[in-house]
Amino acid sequence: MRDLHPDVASTATETIIKESEGFRLRMEKWESISPKGLISVDLIQESLKEDGTVGHSSTYNFNMTKDELQTLAQGLTS
Protein backbone atom coordinates (compact mmCIF):
# COMPACT_ATOMS: atom_id res chain seq x y z
CA MET A 1 0.00 0.00 0.00
CA ARG A 2 1.16 3.51 -0.72
CA ASP A 3 2.58 5.85 1.91
CA LEU A 4 -0.33 7.66 3.51
CA HIS A 5 -0.50 10.53 5.97
CA PRO A 6 -0.38 9.14 9.54
CA ASP A 7 -3.88 10.50 10.26
CA VAL A 8 -5.41 8.24 7.58
CA ALA A 9 -2.97 5.32 7.59
CA SER A 10 -4.82 3.70 10.49
CA THR A 11 -8.04 3.60 8.42
CA ALA A 12 -6.39 2.06 5.35
CA THR A 13 -7.13 -1.45 4.11
CA GLU A 14 -6.06 -3.40 1.05
CA THR A 15 -7.92 -6.35 -0.46
CA ILE A 16 -7.17 -8.56 -3.43
CA ILE A 17 -10.50 -8.96 -5.19
CA LYS A 18 -9.35 -11.31 -7.95
CA GLU A 19 -6.05 -12.86 -8.93
CA SER A 20 -5.46 -15.23 -11.79
CA GLU A 21 -2.64 -15.97 -14.18
CA GLY A 22 -1.61 -12.65 -15.71
CA PHE A 23 -4.19 -10.51 -13.89
CA ARG A 24 -4.93 -9.05 -10.45
CA LEU A 25 -7.57 -6.62 -9.20
CA ARG A 26 -6.88 -4.94 -5.87
CA MET A 27 -8.79 -2.43 -3.79
CA GLU A 28 -7.20 0.09 -1.44
CA LYS A 29 -9.41 2.30 0.71
CA TRP A 30 -9.00 4.85 3.46
CA GLU A 31 -10.99 7.57 5.15
CA SER A 32 -10.11 11.09 4.02
CA ILE A 33 -9.09 13.80 6.44
CA SER A 34 -11.11 16.46 4.69
CA PRO A 35 -13.89 16.63 3.87
CA LYS A 36 -14.86 14.42 6.77
CA GLY A 37 -17.02 11.43 5.94
CA LEU A 38 -15.54 10.63 2.53
CA ILE A 39 -13.80 7.37 1.84
CA SER A 40 -11.23 7.16 -0.94
CA VAL A 41 -11.42 3.91 -2.89
CA ASP A 42 -8.77 2.88 -5.42
CA LEU A 43 -9.45 -0.05 -7.73
CA ILE A 44 -6.10 -1.16 -9.18
CA GLN A 45 -6.05 -3.40 -12.24
CA GLU A 46 -2.67 -5.06 -12.75
CA SER A 47 -1.27 -7.10 -15.62
CA LEU A 48 1.17 -9.65 -14.27
CA LYS A 49 4.27 -10.94 -16.02
CA GLU A 50 5.14 -14.64 -16.00
CA ASP A 51 7.39 -14.11 -12.95
CA GLY A 52 4.49 -12.55 -11.00
CA THR A 53 5.74 -8.96 -11.13
CA VAL A 54 3.47 -6.15 -12.31
CA GLY A 55 3.92 -5.29 -15.97
CA HIS A 56 1.24 -2.60 -16.21
CA SER A 57 -1.34 -1.14 -13.85
CA SER A 58 -4.33 1.18 -14.07
CA THR A 59 -5.85 2.88 -11.03
CA TYR A 60 -9.42 4.11 -10.78
CA ASN A 61 -10.15 6.39 -7.81
CA PHE A 62 -13.57 7.08 -6.31
CA ASN A 63 -14.51 9.22 -3.31
CA MET A 64 -17.72 8.06 -1.66
CA THR A 65 -19.65 8.36 1.55
CA LYS A 66 -20.41 5.25 3.63
CA ASP A 67 -23.99 5.29 2.31
CA GLU A 68 -22.74 5.38 -1.28
CA LEU A 69 -20.38 2.47 -0.54
CA GLN A 70 -23.30 0.52 0.95
CA THR A 71 -25.34 1.15 -2.21
CA LEU A 72 -22.41 -0.01 -4.35
CA ALA A 73 -21.93 -3.16 -2.25
CA GLN A 74 -25.65 -3.99 -2.43
CA GLY A 75 -25.66 -3.45 -6.19
CA LEU A 76 -22.66 -5.75 -6.65
CA THR A 77 -24.11 -8.54 -4.51
CA SER A 78 -27.72 -8.50 -5.75
Image (tube, rainbow, N blue to C red):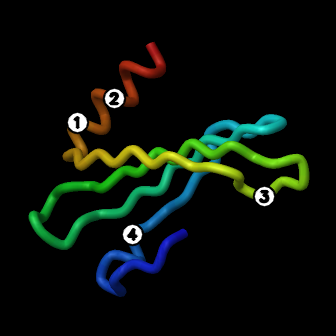
Q: Which residue is mark 1?
A: 68
Q: Which residue is mark 2?
A: 72
Residue displayed at 55% across by 58% down:
14
- Distance from Cα at disc 1 to Cα at disc 4: 18 Å
Q: Which residue is mark 4?
A: 11
Residue displayed at 54% across by 69% down:
1
For numbered disc 1, what is the local secondary structure?
helix
Above or below 65: residue 9: below
Compared across the picture, whether 50 is left or right of 42 comes to right
For numbered disc 2, what is the local secondary structure?
helix
For numbered disc 4, what is the local secondary structure?
loop
- Distance from Cα at disc 3 to Cα at disc 1: 33 Å
- Distance from Cα at disc 3 to Cα at disc 4: 27 Å
Which of the two labelled residues, at mark 3 and mark 1, occupies the earlier sequence position? 3
Q: Which residue is mark 3?
A: 53
- Distance from Cα at disc 3 to Cα at disc 2: 30 Å
Which of the two labelled residues, at mark 4 and mark 2, occupies the earlier sequence position? 4
Q: Position of residue 7 (x, y in %)?
A: 30, 83
Which of the two labelled residues, at mark 3 and mark 2, occupies the earlier sequence position? 3
Which of the two labelled residues, at mark 1 and mark 4, occupies the earlier sequence position? 4
Q: What amino acid type is highlighted by mark number 4? A: Thr
In the rendered image, the quadrant that contains the C terminus is: top left
- Distance from Cα at disc 4 to Cα at disc 2: 20 Å
